[in-house]
Amino acid sequence: MKVSEIARYLGVTADTVRFYTRINVLNPKRSQVNGYREYSEADVHRLRFVLSARQLEFSVDDIQQILSHSDKKKSPCPTVRRLIEKRLHETEQRFEEMVRLRDRMRESVREWSALPDREPDGNMVCHLIEKFTANFSEDSSS
């Protein structure tokens, strides 16, 4: 299977296939006839695994670590469990940050709807955002 074929088969770009080949996650054989990379069913399975892991927010380094265990015929499951717990914690932190941002945005929409428009002067571009920034600085310093 050529780069374009494996890419089409898995619904990714050829650049994605080339990237994982370049970092040695995939190791296609070279054709003796034309020198093209020939991807095997094992490469398809491996890339499918990588794509699934990426959907769970495993990093490329994480995936390489998991594959290294597997390539050595060692169970990667303990590593996978540890890494998914770490990714879950990071996701929960990002989620909490997004909830705080959503709340700030909702508050801004509510407050700003009652405020008049102002033209910029030499010290102010948009009083709405600058008021928000001043309030945010006060909140974060406490």
Image (spheres, rainbow, N blue to C red):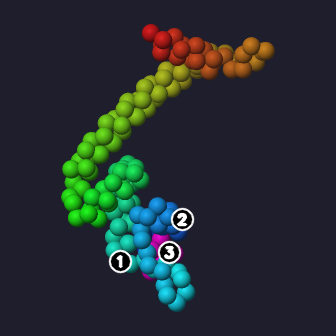
Mark 2 secondary-structure assignment? helix
Residue stretch in magenta = 1-8
Based on the picture, tell me whether residue 7 belongs to the magenta stretch: yes
Please tell me which residue lies in front, 23 or 111: 23
For image coordinates 27% across by 58% down, the residue present is 69
Mark toward the start of the polypeptide (1 vs 3): 3
Q: Is residue 127 above or below residue 35?
A: above
Based on the picture, tell me whether residue 92 belongs to the magenta stretch: no
The span from disc 1 to disc 2 (Cα, nearest Å) is 19 Å
Where does the image place residue 76, in percent across and percent down from the top left? Answer: 24, 56
Residue 3: image tag: 3
Mark toward the start of the polypeptide (1 vs 2): 2
For image coordinates 51% across by 11% down, the residue present is 138
Where, by quadrant of the figure, is residue 118 drawn? top right
Where does the image place residue 132, in percent across and percent down from the top left? Answer: 57, 18
Residue 15: image tag: 2
Residues packed near mark 1 inside 10 Å, few (<14), some (14 to 19) or many (20 plus)? few
Residue 117 shown left or right of residue 68 in the figure? right
The span from disc 3 to disc 2 (Cα, nearest Å) is 9 Å
